[in-house]
Amino acid sequence: MTATERSGAVLFAKIDIAASGNIVAATAAKKIRVLSYALIAATAVTAKWQSATTPTDHSGAMSLPATGGLVCNHNPAGWFDTNAGEALKLTLGASIQVSGHLSYQLIA
């Protein structure tokens, strides 16, 4: 079993998108628990976290200002979990460059 398949290991992903897209790929029967993240937008845009397939919202539409963003510091309990077996998607209100990073766990 690799680190990416082992439940509970803290994993990391970069965020580098210019349109809505998956940030962390789905893993069969596992939820993705987001522990921390940082987002920076090139110009003003809204962003929200979703489970990719359903889609299920895990945040409201967050307004990111031009060349600004937000940081959600480490939360050991997690900010939210995706639906089991679904990718973590960042949905943008427009095709704008959004960059950053996140930490997460795969959980049963």
Image (cartoon, rainbow, N blue to C red):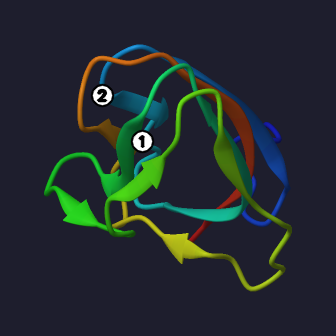
State left or right for residue 105 relative to residue 82: right
Residue under label 2, please give it: 20
Q: Residue at x 43, y 33 (%)?
A: 44
Mark linked to residue 79? none
Q: Badge 2: how crowded within 10 Å, few (<14), some, or many (20+)?
A: some
Say whether residue 98 is visible: yes
Task: Give me the residue at 47% from left, 45% from top.
Answer: 27
Instruction: Using residue 94 as the reference point, say whether residue 27 is left or right of it.
Output: right
Quarter residue 95 falls in: top left
Which sits in the foreground, 50 or 28?
50
Q: Is residue 5 visible?
A: no
Residue 102 percent across, percent down from the top left: 72, 45
Instruction: Specify the farthest residue to the bottom.
Output: 77
For the C terminus, give its image quadrant: bottom right
How packed mark 1 is, by other alpha carbons closer than 10 Å (few <14, some 14-19, many 20 or more), is many
What amino acid does circle 2 point to?
A: Ser
Residue at 65% x, 38% y is: 68
Front residue of this view, candidates 93 and 82: 93
Q: Nearer the viewer, residue 24 or 1?
A: 24
Vertical placement of residue 7 versus 87, above or below: below
Quadrant of the snapshot with the N terminus: top right
Identify the amino acid type marked 1: Ala
Residue receiving disc 1: 26
Quote the CA–CA distance across marks 2 and 1. 16 Å
Q: Quadrant of residue 79?
A: bottom right
Residue 34: x %, y % from top left: 64, 62
In the rendered view, tell whether residue 69 sits above or below residue 43: below
Would you say 51 lies left or right of 32 here?
left
Quarter location, residue 18:
top left
Position of residue 18 in the picture relative to residue 9 (left or right): left
